[in-house]
Image (spheres, helix red, strand yellow):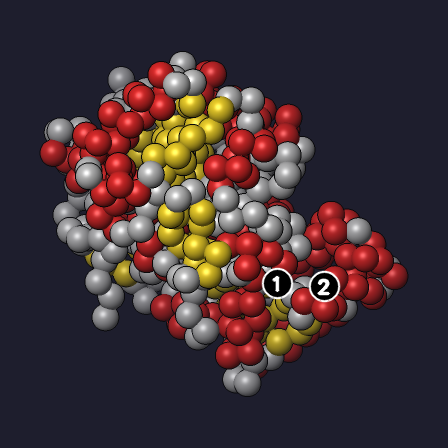
Amino acid sequence: MNKPLVFGAIADDLTGGSELASMLVARGVRTRFTVGPAESFAQGFDAHVIALKTRVIPVEQAISQVLRAAESLIAQGARQIFFKYCATFDSTPQGNIGPCSEALMDRLGARYALFCPALCETQRTVYQGHMFGGAQLLAESPKRNDPLTPMTDSNLVRVLQSQARRKAGLVNYQVVDAGAQSIRMACETLSGEGRSLLLVDTLWERHLASIAQASADMPLLTGNSSVAAHLPPVWQERGLVSLEQSATLPAVDGPAAVLVGSVAEQTMRQIDEFSPRHPVLTIDMDRAFAGDDLVAEARDFARTAVAAGTPFAISTAQVQSVVEKVQSRYGRDQAAAKAEHLLSEIAKSIVFELGVRRLLIAGGETSGAIIAALGILEMTVGPYQGPGIARAVSSSPFPLALMLKSGKLGKPDIFETVLNDMRQELTYSPATEWPPRRV
């Protein structure tokens, strides 16, 4: 009989799922990462992260997929379910954070659940229920212009309440700063007042550690990856896991490419950093809607770069003013779907026909579409190396090195740096402090 899982996670996109898995791996936790629920269970894992593509799909479809993933994890004996979403609480007006969380609460019989989206490492913090990026409120940040999930309200208690049937509440800074026992007591008090969707103020990494300690026995925890990164020390103290002493992510060589669907400002900076030394093709979305064969053009562009032995990038991203014009002509959802379809077809062409074996994908929704198009169901994930940096390798039907990068994360030179790193075997030991120090 397989050992029951200590931790089962459901991520609403692939970039977030790979980041979560990489954090657990960096902590020494034996972690399985699959795209969708696994058809068969595997031995030797303490955690299983299931990545979905549910952030912006219709609510009922999202709930159905999340519950199916939960059933897979429950069948593996997971003692806790974690619902992972973006640090900026990305959602549409209808969801899907609130509805999916409530569906999981119903299934697990949870009286309340914590919501901890903070990523203190990047100064994504929550104070008095409001999200900040550094000193800037979320609604005043570039997230207000996101083409799919614009965040125009910084009050996350209010955002969550607008999506939910249950009442939302706040575990405030003073409570969190007093430690794990204080958090647990506040949860019971708020629950007694009829509030069961409990957003947690979080300003410092030590707050994340306290929240993890307070929530380790809860049937359901929700949030960004960073709070889950503080759970493994709690599990180790309780004898639930025996952390790995070292592990290796294999090297992969071969042609390299970047596919960009994100229009985040940081991704645009990364393209600007990459382009002086490498060929970059930007897709004209007006031509795509006109029916031009842009996949064939992209294949010809990629073939030239592969023959020259140089990494290349293909992007549907444009400056904000151009994106807005495309959306106004064709509709926001239609524009996004067209871009995802184009990049997915291009991905199949460059991987299966041109032999690309090192691939970086920028954008959560884009990553989901491309990985589905490539038929990838499981990956070996390497250790967390910083925000937006989570390498992985898919071995079927051939080795393919991957990075699924959130659009708004990563240093300006991440494209070239990561593609080069993929050629080197990565051996690592568990991180004993968090966030891990990087040279």
The percent coordinates of residue 425 (x first, y second) are 29, 62
Residue furthest right as drawn: 290
The image quarter containing residue 388 is: bottom left
Residue furthest bottom as drawn: 276
Left or right of residue 181: residue 297 = right
- Tag 2's secondary structure? helix
Residue furthest top as drawn: 109
Residues tagged 2 and 1 counted as in contact (Cβ below 8 A): yes
Let me know if residue 302 appears in the view. Answer: yes
Q: Is residue 319 above or below residue 251?
A: below
Label drawn at residue 263: 1
- Tag 1's secondary structure? loop
Residue drawn at x 46%, y 16% is 107
Label drawn at residue 323: 2
Let me know if residue 225 appears in the view. Answer: no
The percent coordinates of residue 319 (x first, y second) are 67, 70
